[in-house]
Image (cartoon, grey):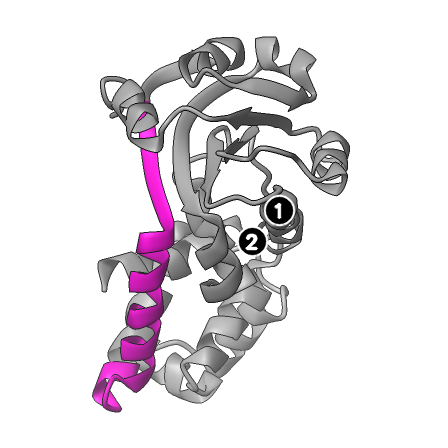
Amino acid sequence: MDQLKVTIAGEITLSKDPGGSMKKWREIFQISQTDLAGFLKVSSSTISDYEGGRRKSPGIAVINRLVEALIEIDKNKGGKVTQQLSRDEAVKEKVFDVHEFTAGINGKDFLEKIEGECIANPLRLKDLTLYGYTVIDSLKVILDVPVHEYLQMYGKTPERALIFTTVENGRSPLIAVKVGRFATEMRPTVVVLHGCQKVDPIAKRIAENEKIALIITQKPIDKLIETFKGMEA
């Protein structure tokens, strides 16, 4: 439940159109503006103004109240929407294994630690600082996770490495990153294709266009995790 609240609040907070995101979640929960306003003890026009962008972006306190209201109203109606979303959240937790570093690590040092080869935008590495990494099952993210939930892969910051496992040629992971940027307005600092023997030219082109350092590594995933363990927060 707490993770679901973080997901909803995080998306609204980081959205370019927070009012539109508020409206989307209200409609997902199948709650009218009138019912939401009544629960929050505000006027319906206040909800309408937020959703229509006629009020300034809501602060985190307002967003938290909104999220709590959506879940509480749904609970009073039997909790079906919350249960379904929580099941989806459990899937994402398996897909996005998010970790933060205790301190930033330079891109070139990161490359050395994972014994990788940078095949796109290698010159960017010396100026990059990574603050975390996310291990992602590339098949599950494509098959099981809706695009608007891609925000979860970025943890506390997009200044991180997305490490995709079960990679065939890298096209699908890079397409997911590109499509996800339009939904979340975020892009990773580094993308790592784990175990990829031959990278699809389109994957490389996407990385170059998006200014993402693209790395391939054959180092066993358990060894990668072991390498990062002492650096994690």
User: Which of 229/71 is in front?
Assistant: 229
Callout 2 touching callout 1 (CB < 8 Å)? yes
User: Where does label 2 land, which residue?
Assistant: 15
Which percent across, then down, holds residue 122? 66, 15
User: Which of 152/215 is in front?
Assistant: 215
Q: Residue at x 38, y 53 (%)?
A: 95
Quick check: is 102 in the magenta stretch?
no
User: Can residue 12 be seen in this snapshot?
Assistant: no
Question: In the figure, is residue 143 to the left or right of 208?
Answer: left
User: Where does label 1 land, which residue?
Assistant: 185
The residue furthest front is 197
User: Which of 131/48 is in front?
Assistant: 131
Q: Nearer the viewer, mark 2 or mark 1?
A: 1
Q: Residue at x 53, y 73 (%)?
A: 23
Q: Residue at x 57, y 70 (%)?
A: 51
Of marks 2 and 1, which one's residue comes earlier in the chain? 2
